[in-house]
Image: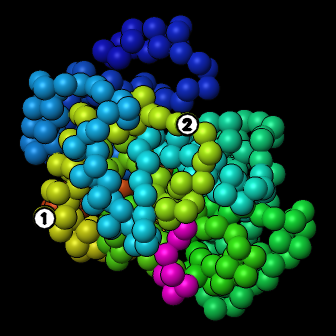
Amino acid sequence: MSPAAPLHDRHRAVMPSWLALYYSEPLELTHGEGRHVWDASGKRYLDFFGGILTTMTAHALPEVTKAVSEQAGRILHTSTLYLDRHMVELAERVASLSGIPDARVFFTTSGTEANDAALLLATTYRGSNQILAMRNSYHGRSFSTVGITGNTSWSPTSLSPLQTLYVHGGVRGRGPYAHLSDGQFIEACVADLEDVLGQAHGTVAALIAEPVQGVGGFTAPPDGLYAAFREVLKRHGILWITDEVQTGWGRTGDHFWGWQAHAASGPPDLLTFAKGIGNGMSIGGVVARADVMNCLGANSISTFGGSPVTMAAGLANLTYLIEHDLQGNARRVGGLLLERLRAIGAGLPIVHEVRGRGLMAGVELVGRDGSPSPDAAARTLEHARERGLLIGKGGREGNTLRIAPPMTLTVAEAEEGAAILEEALSRAQQDLAAEEGP
């Protein structure tokens, strides 16, 4: 029996049945350092998933742990009813970095809550509950964000306070426009957007979109798609919300924010963020133009959003990221990793596509007949874990490996992880071939 087995039994006895755990024998992770974590048995793993893209810089980063410890020794909590220097300083930096003119920042505790706040702002500002969202999207687990999630495997109910109209374009490699050139793809998606707007009942509040769809399997449209969408949105007065929960802070390498790959028509009206900025601490937030942010006519506070400890952590983490050019590291090391993964995939029929940007790599897996294979993804996760590598999975069919290491990843660690993944993929392919027969 593994050390985690009794804990797993206790977990099942008190936690919801829908609360997913990775692996046939779930792991209890007890500590981490740099790009590595250890489980309760003392086994070390190279972490290529970072708590779902949340451990952005490194495990136990001294600058962050020091900031947390020092602030915790002074005061843990005050709420937004009082001034907090760390919150103001972090808001100033985020507003400046966002690219949104005359920006205001509201801190939350998660990406779900950030997207929920953005929806409240957009629908109030526009006086409409109609939202445009992308097919295959994921924006959170609250009642409102589930209602705009286009990935059915993460949408447990059709009930919603919003009317959501889904637009094509988030997935380049599959669907009715996959055969088109990038330019033609954008033209077709813009035409689809125009057609969808023809079905709307008057005012539409906003389009919300992930520049790279995270849970959807790290899929992305051609650069410039959302700039073309923006031209249509402007004509109708519709707001653009960019969900940067997974793409923000330079992880894509080429840009600090994912929206900057679609910047020709200007910045978004609202930007949501979370995950990596706290490096494991619970931080989320929304940035918006002042007139949009200030449109609420009722009182509001955040009890835990912007707490002194999390704000101190966020400031320390953001400072480290910028001073050490982790965006540049994501571009350089991520580029090498993607090249290595593509070379591996070229020799394995199980790999349909390797895609991504910077330190966001998706490896889509298929069966012998070319259909999506969630079984192949699950097996690869297990084989990688056995060899000391932690990765994630996602996609609409659950058949895409999600690879997103901390942004301090070294070249040697990228090579080590790629070699382990090659072994795991080869083993998964052998397993499936043995079961399918000649």
Q: Name which residue lies at 67% across and 57% down.
A: 125
What percent of the width, then of the height, locates residue 231? 66, 84
Q: Which mark is residue 299?
A: 2
User: What residue is drawn where x is 89% and y is 73%?
Assistant: 198
* Residue plotted at (19% across, 25% down): 75
Q: Nearer the viewer, residue 80 or 435?
A: 80
Return the disc, 2 or 1, that comes first in the chain's sequence.
Answer: 2
- Of 2 and 368, nearer the camera is 2
Q: Secondary structure at mark 1?
A: helix
Asked whether 350 or 10 is in front, the reply is 10
**Residue contact between numbered discs 2 and 1, judged by CB atoms under 8 Å:** no
Mark 2, other Cα within 10 Å: few <14 / some 14–19 / many ≥20: few
Q: Which residues are magenta?
A: 263-269
Q: How is the image coloured?
A: rainbow
Q: Is residue 33 above or below residue 239?
A: above
State which quadrant residue 414 falls in. Answer: bottom left
Q: Position of residue 354 (x, y in %)?
A: 47, 69
Q: Is residue 265 magenta?
A: yes
Quarter of the figure with the C terminus: bottom right
**Residue 328: x percent and y percent?**
22, 73
Q: CA distance from mark 2 to mark 1?
A: 38 Å
Q: Quadrant of the N terminus?
A: top left
